[in-house]
Amino acid sequence: MRALHTAATGMMAQELNVQVISNNIANMRTTGYKRQRAEFQDLLYEQVRRVGSQTSDQGNILPAGIELGAGVKTVGTPRIMTQGTLSPTGRDFDVAIRGEGFFKVLLPDGRTAYSRDGSFELDAQGRMVTNQGYVVQPGITVPQNASQVTINAMGQVSVVLPGNTDSTQLGQIELAMFINKAGLQGIGDNLYLETTASGTPQNGTPSADGFGNLQQGNLEQANVEAVTEISDLIAAQRAYEMNAKVINAADQMLSSTSNLIR
């Protein structure tokens, strides 16, 4: 019976939907995390009676046909790249982006990754790195004896060196923007990679040419809203249950037919 297969596709789609929602909820406290949303489309239709076909020699046209759908399919789980809430931390090397842009990070294999997570640290050489030890690009090294580290809204990193009263600029944090941010490939560790869908990165400095500005001593929280995720989870659960009821009804109908044959 066709209904068994159709309902099964609905159950598989809602199972994936719940997986996406559960990942969003699991990352509610992940710095810079961007929530995902499952998107679906209907499958091909069997045209039992094609709409618009001629029904008589006098040219009568069928106003409405008979189309039997084959179920549903998942077409994507795009990320919703909206701004997350900024949370103050008070740490010198915690930096949040308010607006457009991604931090650039150098991976061990030489590739450049992109992130909204600005919880930076210093490694043994004094370089600004991520929590995984990946160097923030372009590389900025802070001397061991430096004090009063300042990262302004334009991404300029300055410190006060011994014997000086004025601050010394060490470097400039750069950001990257993409035409299609949802096309970035997530690789874990709060990092994304460029893809053909995202387009090539446009590099620039914070507060200029449409780029967001930086907020020192803050971190961007995940853009996950608990109420929205829970309501989506309930809707997905109910849709799964209704598809299960369709399978149960189809099974009972097949059982009745089988009993008649006996």
Image: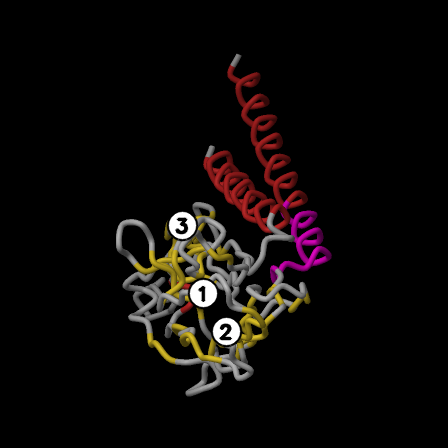
Can residue 68 be spotted in the picture? no
The amino acid at mark 1 is Pro
In this image, 57 relative to 253: left or right? left
Depth check: 247 or 133 in front? Answer: 133
The amino acid at mark 2 is Leu
Question: Which residue is situated farthest in the bottom direction here?
Answer: 209
Can residue 90 be spotted in the picture? yes
For marks 2 and 3, the one nearer the N-term is: 2
Label 3: how many residues lie within 10 Å, few (<14), some (14-19) or many (20+)? few
In this image, 242 relative to 117: left or right? right
Residue highlighted by disc 2: 161
Q: Is residue 22 above or below residue 79?
A: above
Residue highlighted by disc 1: 143
Label 2: how many residues lie within 10 Å, few (<14), some (14-19) or many (20+)? some
Q: Is residue 225 magenta?
A: yes
Residue plotted at (49% across, 56% down): 39
Does the CB distance between marks 2 and 1 fall below 8 Å? yes
Residue plotted at (65% across, 38% down): 241
SS under mark 3: strand
Question: Which residue is situated farthest in the front direction here?
Answer: 163
The residues colored magenta run 222-236
SS under mark 2: loop
Q: What is the C-alpha distance between the residues marked 1 and 3? A: 32 Å
Q: What is the C-alpha distance between the residues marked 2 and 1? A: 8 Å
From the viewer's perspective, is the residue at label 1 or at label 3 nearer?
A: 1
SS under mark 1: loop
For marks 1 and 3, the one nearer the N-term is: 1
Q: Main SS type for the magenta part?
A: helix
The amino acid at mark 3 is Ile
The image position of residue 128, as x and y in percent, is: 44, 61
The image position of residue 218, as x and y in percent, is: 62, 68
Residue highlighted by disc 3: 187
